[in-house]
Amino acid sequence: MKSPRRAAVSILRAWSKGHAYAENLIERHASRNDLSSADRALLNAIVLGVLRNLRLLDHWIAGLRKGKLDDETRDILRVGLCQLLILQLPDHAAVFETVELGKSSVRGLINAVMRRAATNRKELLDTAPLPPEVRHSHPDWLCKRWQQIFGKDEAEALMAFNNGAAPVIARLNPLVKEPVSLPENASTEDMPEGFLRIEGPIPGELLAKGAIYIQDPATRHSVELLDPKPGERILDACAAPGGKAFLIAAAQGSGKDLVCTDSNEKRLPRLRDNLKRLHCADAEIDVHDWSQPAPEKWHGAFDAILLDVPCSNTGVFRRRVDVRWRLQQKDIGDLTKLQRQIIDNALPCLKPDGRLVYSTCSIEPEENEDLILALLAEEPSLRLEKSHQVLPQLDGTDGAYAALLKKTL
Ligand SMILES: C[S@@+](CC[C@H](N)C(=O)[O-])C[C@H]1O[C@@H](n2cnc3c(N)ncnc32)[C@H](O)[C@@H]1O
């Protein structure tokens, strides 16, 4: 079995070549190799630490070693410097274990860089003179965009927030009627009603019996705006993996009037499993791509529709640490077109007087309020009732946007 440090290098190599998310690569490795919880925690900390601080680590490497580096040696140095300077692990372990990761031809180089870093730790860690996009490791285009939208100080606060550790927060399942005894590592202090903060291991038993679901408080606004009532027929159009679907079912008392769809067939088994575990297996599940017109059977069929659309995820960079490196500026325009198509195809499915909640975990105006304003200008049958924007740098949770629209004609 590979050491967590060697596994971290393999995962970073695989990540740089493919399209898999870092979290999935870590999960796959940890379950295939049956890692101990300590090794798993170290692997997680190293891989996420490297991806959160990629630009800063490369800035340090460039200062410590002149000349070219092959990709694998660069990844080994990223893993080594992350342990030494980000995770602040003891020097001897970080240096020795990192040197061991290299082939014999590069061990001298790795040793020299790691020792230089240990000697110059204080100067390296003084990142104040660096530009914010390097200090907080974000792409130039995103840093510039956020500076224009939020101003320099808020953009910097947002990037710093994105690099902080993400707390584990769970939602209690209101469909579980019997009292749940909370483990000692769960606390409701400073949490919105129904949420728990969990420190350390996630209580597997509560998860398995569907008493809790891991979910950030920012997710609650869209379902609160939708305000599902018992007996209403409701569509959750982009439903997988089911985090909001179970809240709709909880508000209705069961899943029997809920239709959940998703375009990605591969995500449906997880949606099905989650709904079963969360006590709402009676919801209907269908595959449908909402960039295409809705089937006739759904026209005028729903009292309320939730569109929790695919988005840039810029509100959740703290949890999805590698998305910032995958996302391209042009993706925002492409996503906006898809989001609008999804709305246009879902609208005919509302009953007269029906409600539609549009939601994203993006903080980009084009995907949120700009899109809704453009929609309202073209659709006189819709009225904006309420909207809610959550910004990580101001609210201290994941970012999210939700707008409640009412059909009036
Ligand atoms: C933000 S996630 C939904 C999260 C879900 N509502 C929850 O709370 O767990 C967006 C979902 O939209 C799905 N999706 C993407 N494009 C779609 C489309 N054209 N039609 C329907 N679903 C789509 C994705 O597969 C993904 O599962």
Image (cartoon, helix red, strand yellow):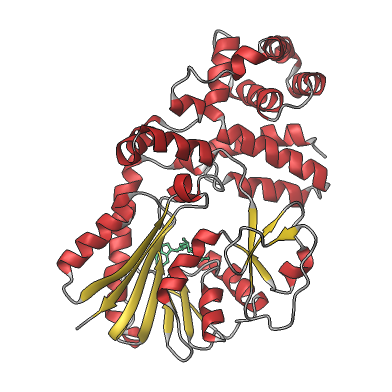
* Residue 279 to residue 2: above or below: below
Left or right relative to 204: residue 403: left
Left or right relative to 37: residue 128: left
* Residue 65 to residue 393: above or below: above
Query: Residue 101, how many percent across, how many down?
Result: 75, 24
* Residue 366 to residue 256: above or below: above
Q: Residue at x 50, y 78 (%)?
A: 248
* Residue 141 appearing in the image: yes
Q: Residue at x 35, y 49 (%)?
A: 364
For the N terminus, give its image quadrant: top right
Query: Residue 229, how many percent across, how many down?
Result: 46, 86
For residue 62, which quarter of the picture? top right
* Residue 333 to residue 262: above or below: above
Left or right relative to 90: residue 236: left
For the C terminus, give its image quadrant: bottom left
Q: Residue furthest front?
A: 190
Query: Residue 45, how many percent across, how many down?
Result: 69, 38
Is residue 216 or residue 395 the one in the foreground? 395
Q: How many marks?
A: 0
* Residue 291 appearing in the image: no
Q: Residue at x 47, y 19 (%)?
A: 130
Instruction: Report the image quarter containing ligand 1.
Output: bottom left
Q: Residue furthest bottom?
A: 231
Query: Residue 303, how many percent across, how many down?
Result: 36, 85
Q: Residue at x 31, y 41 (%)?
A: 149
Is residue 56 or residue 108 the one in the foreground? 56
Is residue 360 or residue 186 the one in the foreground? 186
